[in-house]
């Protein structure tokens, strides 16, 4: 069955690598915005009888990215595509994974419902699964959650020594990445504790005392959005007399002035995966 990659506005860099790696050609696609803000989507090549891989991260302007994906996927099906698979390096809306307050939208479930109605299959990386343990609990299509743990572990092993480096998760939710990565390469690890007061105010503290003095710390988290959690984690470990603090995240959302905040807190370096295009 012929295949093609449809590159949406938030998937350009990732799609280019995917196309080169798999040897699948990119499909010409015109994306635009009307003067009133409405989205325009047009396929400039035939999709008929093909399996179309649509690459889009739900980042930056996630609402536009989501609607653009929905419009493109539905259009491809109407034009005769055999299958439409979604490649979403970053799957947004997963942090609203329950109704925290009366009357709130359970956003993760509703976004999953929308995507299940326009895609035949979905692939993503390190979805924020905390209260929802599997994507298949909310999606009605096959949904595969791939892991970035191996390349991150290889990066840490190459840059740091296990003798004087501690891998740290800034909160309980990060333990599924930080602890797993540390164990795979034989590094010491610990998970900090976080208390959230509201979306822009958190307090992070050291829960387990270690021999911190003079060591390098690598803080690993899945998503850095406002940067408050990462910045507070840096401050917490620096109080223990560590040598350097390095930060790694999978999804560099970096809203507001997150990067400046993290650097100001004392990060020696910041690195991220390519699920969201960013200089880090």
Image (tube, helix red, strand yellow):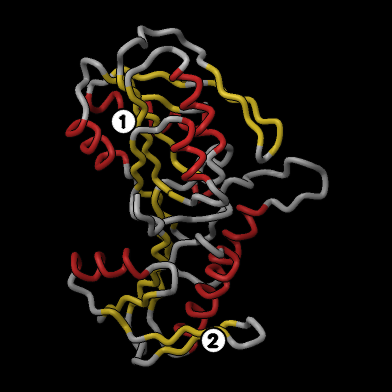
As drawn, 134 above or below 164 = below
Q: Which residue is mark 2?
A: 40
Q: Pick the residue in front: 91 or 198.
A: 198
On the image, the x and y values in percent for residue 99 come to 72, 44
Left of 151 or right of it: where is 124? Answer: right
The label shown at residue 181 is 1
On the image, the x and y values in percent for residue 258 come to 52, 45
The label shown at residue 95 is none
Instruction: Give the residue furthest to the front.
Output: 264
Q: Residue 201 falls in which quadrant of the image?
A: top right
User: Where is the N terminus found, in terms of image quarters?
Assistant: bottom left
**Callouts 2 and 1 close, C-beta under 8 Å:** no
Mark 2 to mark 1 CA distance (whole Å): 42 Å
Q: Residue 40 falls in which quadrant of the image?
A: bottom right
Left of 27 or right of it: where is 237? Answer: right
On the image, the x and y values in percent for residue 105 come to 73, 53
Residue at x-position 57% and y-position 71%: 64
On the image, the x and y values in percent for residue 127 come to 46, 48
Q: Residues within 10 Å of mark 1 (few under 14, many from 20)?
A: many
Q: Pick the residue in front: 185 or 197.
A: 197
Q: Residues within 10 Å of mark 2 (few under 14, many from 20)?
A: few
Report helix, strand or loop for mark 2: strand
């Amino acid at each position: 069955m012929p295949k093609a990659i449809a590159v949406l506005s938030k998937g350009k860099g990732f799609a280019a690598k995917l196309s080169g790696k798999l040897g699948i050609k990119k499909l010409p696609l015109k994306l635009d915005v009307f003067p009133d803000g409405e989205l325009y989507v047009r396929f400039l090549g035939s999709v008929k009888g093909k399996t179309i891989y649509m690459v889009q991260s739900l980042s930056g302007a996630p609402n536009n990215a989501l609607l653009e994906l929905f419009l493109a996927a539905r259009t491809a099906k109407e034009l005769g595509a055999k299958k439409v698979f979604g490649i979403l390096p970053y799957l947004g809306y997963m942090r609203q994974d329950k109704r925290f307050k009366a009357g709130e939208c359970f956003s993760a479930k509703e976004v999953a419902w929308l995507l299940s109605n326009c895609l035949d299959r979905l692939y993503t990386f390190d979805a924020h699964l905390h209260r929802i343990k599997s994507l298949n609990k909310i999606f009605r299509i096959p949904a595969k959650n791939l892991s970035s743990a191996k390349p991150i572990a290889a990066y840490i092993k190459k840059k740091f020594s296990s003798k004087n480096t501690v891998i740290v998760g800034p909160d309980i939710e990060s333990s599924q990445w930080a602890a797993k990565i540390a164990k795979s390469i034989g590094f010491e690890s610990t998970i900090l504790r976080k208390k959230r007061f509201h979306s822009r105010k958190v307090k992070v503290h050291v829960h387990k005392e270690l021999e911190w003095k003079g060591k390098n710390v690598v803080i690993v988290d899945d998503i850095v959005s406002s940067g408050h959690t990462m910045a507070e984690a840096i401050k917490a470990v620096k109080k223990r007399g560590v040598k350097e603090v390095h930060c790694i995240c999978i999804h560099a959302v970096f809203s507001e002035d997150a990067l400046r905040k993290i650097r100001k807190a004392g990060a020696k370096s910041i690195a991220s995966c390519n699920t969201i295009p960013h200089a880090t």
